[in-house]
């Protein structure tokens, strides 16, 4: 796993991304997306992930502190607007990532269209 690359790729591609339930709150979606990512990282690469973050909660806290918006108003830059459907798909796709994609820092394609 390449932590710096993963964090940068995720932050850039998913500036505003809930669990399997549908949400329109970009802050909650972002938190859930990175929770899903951290859970996959620890499931796929427990030793490596623990060396970087100690545990999944530390992983989530570390990433969302720099990658997630603090309010819905800061998610997308005009003229783009937040697309909740795409963001929810992004969250789902993070939860279903393969270990290979997690290890290579691949951001789900759906996450590239959170702002449309």
Image: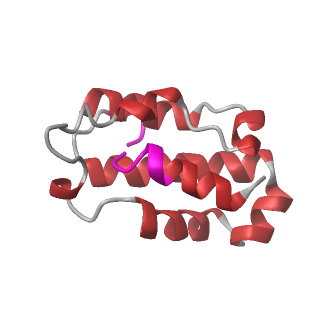
Residue occupying image coordinates x 80% and y 56%: 46
Residue occupying image coordinates x 33% and y 48%: 16
In the picture as drawn, the residue positioned furthest to the front comes out as 79
Instruction: Describe residue 48's horizontal placement relative to residue 73 as left or right.
Output: right
Residue occupying image coordinates x 81% and y 51%: 45
Instruction: Describe residue 113's horizontal placement relative to residue 64 as left or right.
Output: left
In the picture as drawn, the residue positioned furthest to the right comes out as 47
Q: Nearer the viewer, residue 116 or 62?
A: 116
Quarter-wise, where is residue 5 in the image?
bottom right
Quarter-wise, where is residue 70 in the image?
bottom left
Q: Which residues are magenta?
A: 11-21
In the rendered image, the vertical position of residue 67 relative to residue 79, given as above or below: below
> Is 68 contained in the magenta span?
no
Q: Quadrant of the C terminus?
A: top left
Q: Position of residue 76 (x, y in %)?
A: 23, 47
Instruction: Describe residue 6's horizontal placement relative to residue 28 as left or right.
Output: right
Quarter-wise, where is residue 85 in the image?
top left
The rendered magenta stretch, by its main secondary structure, is classed as loop
Residue occupying image coordinates x 57% and y 38%: 107
Q: Position of residue 78 (x, y in %)?
A: 15, 44
């Amino acid at each position: 796993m390449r932590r710096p690359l993963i964090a940068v790729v995720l932050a850039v591609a998913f500036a505003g991304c809930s669990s399997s339930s549908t949400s329109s709150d970009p802050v909650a979606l972002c938190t859930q997306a990175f929770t899903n990512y951290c859970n996959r990282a620890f499931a796929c690469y427990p030793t490596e992930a623990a060396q970087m973050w100690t545990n999944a909660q530390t992983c989530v806290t570390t990433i969302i502190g720099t990658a997630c918006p603090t309010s819905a108003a800061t998610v997308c830059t005009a003229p783009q607007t937040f697309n909740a459907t795409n963001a929810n798909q992004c969250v789902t796709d993070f939860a279903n990532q393969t270990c290979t994609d997690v290890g290579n820092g691949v951001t789900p394609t759906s996450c590239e269209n959170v702002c449309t």
